[in-house]
Amino acid sequence: MKVLVLGAGVIGVTTAWFLNKSGHEVTVVDRQPGAGLETSFANGGQISVSHAEPWANPSAPLKALKWLAQEDAPLLFRLRPDLRQWLWGLSFLRECMPARTRRNIRQIVTLGLYSRATLQSLRAETGIEYDQLTRGILHFYTRQAELDAALEPARVMREHGCDIEIVSPDQCVSIEPALAFSRKLLVGGSMTTSDESGDAHKFTQRLAALAAERGVRFLQRNVLGLLKAGGRIDGVHVEGEMLRADAYVVSLGAYSPLLTRPVGIDLDIYPAKGYSATMPVKDAARAFSVSLTDDEYKLVFSRLGDRLRIAGTAELNGYNTALNEARCRALLRRTEELFPGAGDAARAEFWTGLRPATPSNVPYIGGTRYPNLFLNTGHGTLGWTHSCGSARALADIVSGREPEIEFAFSTPPAKRSARLQRAPRVSPT
């Protein structure tokens, strides 16, 4: 079967890889000249099953209100005359209910465990290298209230298979000695030894090269729209031509709703702008080598070879991609507070990308009302974490096979197998 994958980020490229392995003739279309050049370019670098508590949780509404006037806030709603933003915000508030948060954590953990195992198998199969480290991920806390609030989500994650363990401040320093320089700030943490880190951009580019060797085609085209006819998708308008295939997969990240809305599929995805700073290691004795998450500031720290990557925060400001200097400087300020002298801040490179955020943090994976149109999008902050599992499951769905994971796929109910129907429905909207 001929399949067109729209989008060459980490989601689109992994989707193309697993579709090709399933025997399909695959073409990937993206407006960029290479793979992984937008949201996958400079993200936090974590393969983080333990990052399963969604932004929408019971404590979020009050925090979001407090942060409205704070330019460098971890989560910043820039209120706009934008109906989509307001509707998304209302859905976000609904997902903050405790029962919905627990249900969403279950879905996120389930997909994360499956995806991490799939990545490990792919790495063993291909020998792909991308500055990967398998030293786990340590979440650390500098306020007791934040640590206390993390205990219940950690319990729910453990219940669903995540090997997360609560640790003391001294244990945090034992796990990552670079935290000794900020030991007085620590109140505790949680450690997941099976989590990983690595450069998503390197991974995406190298997997794209391997896919091309297997016959996957990559086209640089600006995707303009979908053509529907007779209850199916009949083609994709790109600049200068119409591309046709037997099946189509939308993996355009935050831009996915702009493509699907004209054909009657309204995805509850809004762009959440994230920031990162990347700088050379200046003092190896002070630099972290275990991937870390600062839950109070919503930042992640990853070691990528001789580089330090600091990334995070979310700014809901439409499709604006301009760098905000205050938010960039906040990354360096917090890094210097925790790891003084570790990196060469004078040589820091800043980046921003639009994460495709659903209110629940649960992505859209599966089919649509059109039998030959499929979705693999809406992964928010966890696109790198969930990429391989999402792609493998989506390749199964496109191929008419039952995925090996019980997840709330977007496939229309009449086409779900009995086994998948036993899984509770968790909609991203």
Image (cartoon, rainbow, N blue to C red):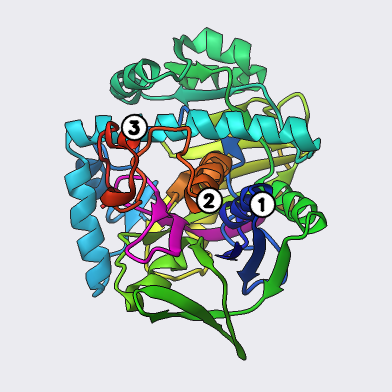
Q: Residues within 10 Å of mark 1 (few under 14, many from 20)?
A: few
Magenta segment range?
Answer: 349-378
Label 2 element class? loop
Q: Nearer the viewer, residue 162 or 403?
A: 403
Separation (CA) of disc 3 from disc 2 = 17 Å
Label 1 element class? loop
Res 48 visible: no
Vertical comparison of 166 with 384: above or below: above
Q: Does residue 359 show up magenta in the picture?
A: yes
How far across and down, in percent of the image, does residue 71 sit? 38, 56
The residue carrying mark 1 is 23
Residue type at mark 2: give it. Ser
Residue type at mark 3: give it. Arg
> Residue 13 appears in which quarter of the rendering?
bottom right
Which labelled disc corresponds to residue 399? 2
Separation (CA) of disc 1 from disc 3 = 25 Å
Vertical comparison of 322 with 106: above or below: below
Residue at left offset 50%, top offset 68%: 321
* Marks 1 and 2, the one that precedes in the sequence: 1
How far across and down, in percent of the image, does residue 214 sit? 79, 54
Q: Does residue 311 show up magenta in the picture?
A: no
The residue carrying mark 3 is 419
Q: Residues within 10 Å of mark 2 (few under 14, many from 20)?
A: some
Contact flag, marks 1 and 2 (Cβ < 8 Å): yes
Residue type at mark 1: give it. Gly
